[in-house]
Amino acid sequence: MMSNPVLEVQEICKIFPGVVANEDVSLSLNSGEILALLGENGAGKSTLMNIIYGLYQPSSGEILVRGKSSKMRSPRDAIGLGIGMVHQHFQLVPVMTVVENVMLGSEMLRHGFLDREQVSQRILDLSRDYQLEVEPSTLVEDLPVGIRQRVEILKALYRDAEILILDEPTAVLTPQEIEGLFEVMDLLRRQGKSIIFITHKLKEVLRIADRIAVLRQGKLVGEVTPSEASEPRLAAMMVGREVMLQVDKKEAEPGDSILEVKGLEARNDLDEICLSEVDLKVNAGEIVGVAGVQGNGQTELVEVLTGLRPLKNGILRIGGHDLSGATPREITDRGKICHVPEDRHSYGMVDNYSVADNLVLNSYYRSPFAKGMTIQRESIDTNAETLVKKFDVRTPSVQTPGASLSGGNQQKMVIARELSRPIQLMIAAQPTRGIDVGSIEFIHQQIVAKRDEGIAVLLISSELDEIMALSDRIVVMYRGSIIGEVLNKETTRQELGLLMAGVKSDSENIHHSAP
Amino acid sequence: MFRVLLIPVLALVTSLALGALVMLLFGDDPILAYQGLFQGAFGSGRAWSSTIRKMIPLILTGLSVAVAFKAGLFNIGASGQFVMGSVFSVAVGIHFEGLPMYIHLPMAILAGMLGGMIWGAIPGFLKVTTGAHEVIVTIMLNYVAALFGGWTVYAGGTQGQTPGPLWDPTARAISETPDVLHSAQIPWIFGPPYRVHFGVFLALLAVLIIWWLIYKTTVGFEIRTVGQNPKAARYAGIRVEKTVVLTMAIAGGLAGLAGTIETLGLNHKFAPEFGGQVGFDGITVALLGQTHPVGVVFASFLFGALDAGAAKMQFESGVAADIIQVIQALVLAFVAAPLIIKALFRLRSTQDDRHSASLNTSWGGS
Amino acid sequence: MSFWSRTARVAVSLVVLMLLMAILVELTPLGENKWMRVFFGVSALNFTLRAAIPLVLGALSGILCERSGIINIGIEGMMLAGAFAGFVAKSSTNDWPLYLSLVFSVIVSLGVGGLMGLLHGMLSIRFRMDQIISGSVIIILAAGLTSYLFDRDAIADGKFTPIPIPLLSEIPVIGPVLFNNPPITYLALLLVLVVHIAIFYTRWGLRTRAVGEHPRAADTEGINVNLMRYFNTMLGGMLAGLAGAYLVLEAVGQFQEGMTAGRGFISLAAMIFGNWTPFGALGAATLFGYTQALQNEFLLAGVTTIPRQFVSMLPYVVTIIAVSGLVGRVRAPAAIGRPYDTEGGR
């Protein structure tokens, strides 16, 4: 390993409207080394890489490639300088072959026509040299995910990339495929390539990286080598040691079991298994927090519990009723649940509808909001006035379109709607994402108040702070299953961080489900 | 309120101005033309009745397209639904001799609406079960309907193809139905030469009912929610598939009613030529009226006036009536892409303008 | 993608089958059966080809547009505009040598078609108009403008006449059908091959397909998505214009208002039924042309059992079935219909 930096970024800042994605980040990558870039979701890792690759323009700061200041106006510039990127979400055209995907944009021609044979040969050569076996003439849509990733890597190598950026490459791989990937990365390193490896998984970082840089909330918080680091120390750097948001609450007094889930299994939109062997129980008067990094099955779990996604296997029982396979309306009515969705714009509210209409989005058909088929406007408006006051939704009027409200008030509106009818179970997914502190406080108080009334609360959040502030019991989801369960008062931030990163510890107070 | 009116009004004005430009470019006199246009639409009792007459089918086809838009659907099938409405209503209207009008007429009208509803429900059903995009299916069904209509009144070829079931034998070589029985004709308010019939009230009644349905009922709430945000609709417990089919059926029924009224109130028979351009007219009227029933009435009035005045315009100034179609295309363009008008008049554009309505999922099959 | 994709194989097999049957009918006692003559007679073949040409060109036009991600239902309008432009050019150059006048008119058709294509592109891309509405605008505009500007007294003198290909046109039966045709017909058939090769074997074709399937992947490799879409829409418009030129300068010889008579929409159907491939489109266009020929043959042969209107319905019903995926699946380019955003401040 030599120490002349092959790539340097100096004081990079990137500001999007309302959010600072990168703040004064300075990093260097040496030739022939693997630099791991570690951080939670939203820490700014992908943004930084997109800047290096020319997909984004930095608000300020400089990029130096092999010592020379370089401006990346588009990926073409980056590719020209030998930088290749393997994206987290593959940029592959499913209906085209491997050959076609690899050569797209850098096509080899013979007599003016595409020279598939030459490219194919080159792919075979590269795959031999780097153990990236792939059959060039297959259609990408016929390839399993692990092989598709090889194609992404081949795309970069085909363009003679010397610097490779791998964005969360192991997120979609099985353990065996991950091993295979590491062998490839090792090969590349030995051949003199330099690699930036983005991840949030601690074990991997310690296994393969030469150096580790940790980003948190857009800033670089530290650089260490594997020998200096340990998983707990890295976890601490990743999640920080800020003061937690405090919520005053008394001890929970759990009652009967309200939500019971056994052996839940479901498939995602690509027909892959996204939930397996999920067992969960929530009792009346307690808050169970589901912790975990976004993308480990939490979204699908909520969809199954609320009837928006069919379950392939398993039982869903709410309040004693078997509601496996029921429609959303049945679950809402018979299960007496409310659902605060994780993406209010996607489906929690209708942007163009007034606050009043949004507040009856899933109860418009019931009395007093409707008499038979006719909508009772006065009842809806009165209901809106009451709720807006009770839940402190700041809006000029109840006729204002939902989209005009601030994020915090939109979420308060959604919660107002969901908490305005008699319920026994509350499912709150990412309830305070993207919201101002004042509103967060209010919403947290509402959730605890409901618990104290005897409602069972299932809280899903990728914000560890929130989980620890509110939950009585905590389960951690990892890759579609529950990897561990603890009592809040018996656990620590570090312990949870490790679980979230897939590390099962031997601590006694963690209850593991089957491996 | 004014913000809503601004774009349509500017669109209309700009289109008329551009139309004038085109006329100048090709040696016509726009002032004379527009004078003639005005005369033909508003200059006399006969002009006014012409305008109202032309307005009626536009209201209904405009409503048809507007209702579909509310659910995020594109109904280009108005002309096919119109034809099916005509055929079904005429089938009832030329038979059942001896029935009193208060039975025969409603029967014929309902039959016509049924024909349209079926023709609208088919693409809706195909969309929810197979994902087939309603634009292609409705366009194809337009042609099927036209051919079907042609078959029903086929006069029988010289080669001996049997005449269609609804053909009028006394019409000899002309392919058309016999006259609708008197008991199934929509009565005149003002008879010839004005020829304004009670269908105008039927159309306005339809506007009222649709307005009530869309904005005052749970069904309308479901339709609008599906159009605004299908995912939110599902979350809200709405059966999206049922709503889509229902909406297309309603849209079809409205366009079918248009055909019915024209047949029972104006033409008093069916012949294959009736029906042509209604499809695109409906789209323009719906968008100019900002897909709101009341807006559709005003937009239909304007286009009815344009249609009515066209003949007089041609007579007075020699400008071919087809220029109206050019103006129509321009109006459609301007209301469908507010960005153009806003760029032209340097108005502020909002975030909404940068996001086009995506009605184009599932194009060409799933 | 192999040259012989499933749709192409089916299309070509059907065409070959028909030709073989025609030979049999013409040269063997098989031809004495009235039904055989109706279905496979030379007259049917000729009619089929003549009907199929504008549909093929229209479908190719749609393929170019839609493969790059822009829905184009305005082919009807572009065709009509091209036809009208060709007519105007021809009738203004009647005093020129015939061939010069004709070729000039074709070029004008191409130009106007291209302009209409560019307009569609601009409305869809720059002004982010819903692409179906933008197609509708093109249709209404073309109908209005062509009727408005049409001088009923104008006459176009002369049209393209058949050019026999030596040797090939002497092949019994199919020779006169396939190898004794006017130039635009030859050109159209040639274009099927050319477009096929272009889409699957050239750099432009690869990028077009990527832009229509996964524009972001193309963007990350430095390809200008919107520029490609503009270019393809313009080319598509030109092909539609060529179809119009065929109608006026080769088929009919004069312009009539609304003479495209829905061919633009049937072309759409042919494009979809052919699964967005040139040879598939050829097969579909041939099929649709064949149904029109059958309708005619039935009439001439005095066949009245099936009403001709129902025979004419075949292309439309068949398309609905194809789009519903009830007989195999057709697949539009994945990213079609959505305007593309480059994000991140570039």
Image: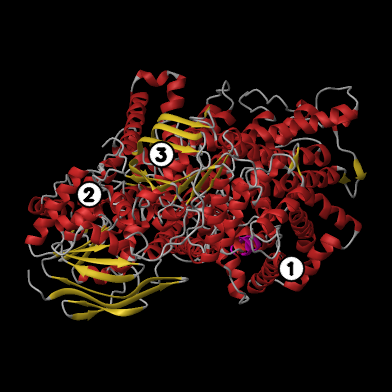
> What is the spatial separation of the Cα atoms under label 1 and label 3, in whole angstroms?
46 Å
Q: Residue at x 65, y 55 (%)?
A: A353
Q: Is residue A194 left or right of residue A509?
A: left
Mark 1 or mark 3, whichever is nearer to me: 1
Q: Is circle 2 on the same chain as circle 3?
A: no
Label 3 resides on the chain identified as C
Mark 2 or mark 1, whichever is nearer to me: 1
User: A181 or A233, which lies in front?
Assistant: A233
Please determine whether, in this image, residue A77 is positioned above or below residue A355: below
Residue B330 magenta-highlighted: yes
Q: Amino acid at mark 1?
A: Phe
Residue A300 magenta-highlighted: no
Q: What kind of element bears circle 3?
A: loop
Q: Which mark is residue A18?
A: none
Question: If the image is split into quadrants, where does the C terminus of chain C sit?
Answer: bottom left
Q: Which residue is mark 2?
A: A98
Q: Amino acid at mark 2?
A: Val
The residues colored magenta run: B329-337
User: A58 or C132, which lies in front?
Assistant: A58
Mark 2 or mark 3, whichever is nearer to me: 2
> What is the spatial separation of the Cα atoms under label 2 and label 1, in whole angstroms?
56 Å
Q: Which mark is residue B2?
A: 1
Please determine whether, in this image, residue B173 is positioned above or below residue A60: above
Label 1 resides on the chain identified as B
Q: Which residue is mark 3?
A: C330
